[in-house]
Amino acid sequence: MAKEMKKYTVELLKISIVGEDYYIFDFKIPNGISFIEGQYGVFMHDNKEIEGRKVRALSIASSNDENILKIATQIGANPSDFKKKMLDLHIGDKMIFNGPMGSFILKQGFHNVFIAGGIGITPIRGILKQIDNMKIKEESVLIYSERRNVYPFKEEFDNMDFLDRYYKNNIENTKAAIDKALQKYANKAFYYVSGSPGFINGIKAQLIDKGIDDKHIKYDRFTGY
C-alpha cells in the first residue's frame, strides 16, 4: 500500500525575484513536518479556482536548519493560471503542501558533483546547505548552467568555502566542466543532476558514456508548468 502524503497549510512570508523570471517563495515552516534536503512537495492553492492543472510538484530549496520552507520556480511571460495565482500571493496568504517525498537526497560517504540547469538549482541549494551545516568532509563540486548568466542563490554558493563552483552559460562549456569532474572523481562520487528533461537526458548520456555507474546518478526532472 502506498504511503499517504501528509497535507499541510503553509503561510507566505516573502517573495524574492532574481533576474526577470526566477521567483523564490519563503513559507512559514508548518508544525510537524519532517523532510530531507532535496525532497519535493505537491503544492496547490488554498480556496482558489484554477484553470487547468490544479497541483504542481515543487522542490524544497531550504535545509532543516533554516526554519522556513523555501521553493523557487520560473514564471515566464505567459504563465499557467496556477503560476499567475502564485504571482498574486501576498504576505500571509496560504497554500497547501502535500509531502514531502522523493529520493533526490544526499548519499554520504562519497564525493558530490552537483549539475544544475536553470531553476533545477532548487533542490541542490537545500543539499548544499545541509553539507555546510553538517561539515561533511567529502569534496563537493557545483556545475551550474544558465544561458543568460542569471544564477539564483549564487551569492550564497560563493560564500561556501567547501564548494568548488563553476558557472556556465551553454551546453558546451557545461559538458567541459563535467568532463573535468569525471576525470577527477569517476565512480568515487555521486552525481546529482537537476533541470529540464532535455538537460538531464543530455547530461545522463555524457555520464554513462564516460563509465559512470547509473546507481551513482540521481535525477530531479523539472518538466515545466
Image: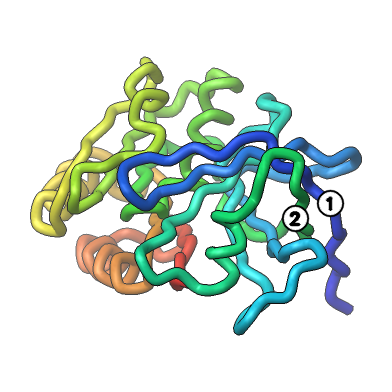
Three-letter residue code for mark 1? Thr
Q: Nearer the viewer, residue 160 or 88?
A: 88
- The answer to whether residue 34 is left or right of residue 88 is right
Residue 90 x/y as whole percent: 66, 45
Q: Which residue is mark 1?
A: 9
Q: How is the image coloured?
A: rainbow
Q: Residue at x 69, y 39 (%)?
A: 91
Residue 14 x/y as whole percent: 61, 35
- The answer to whether residue 180 is left or right of residue 52 is left
Determine crowd level at label 1: few under 14, some 14-19, many 20+ residues with C-alpha closer than 10 A: some
- The answer to whether residue 62 is left or right of residue 176 is right
User: Total label count?
Assistant: 2
The answer to whether mark 2 and mark 1 are in CB contact below 8 A is yes
Label 1: element kind: strand
Three-letter residue code for mark 2? Met
Q: Which residue is mark 2?
A: 95
Please, is residue 206 above or below residue 174 in the view? below
- Rendered image quadrant of residue 6: bottom right
- The answer to whether residue 132 is left or right of residue 46 is left
Q: Residue at x 59, y 21 (%)?
A: 133
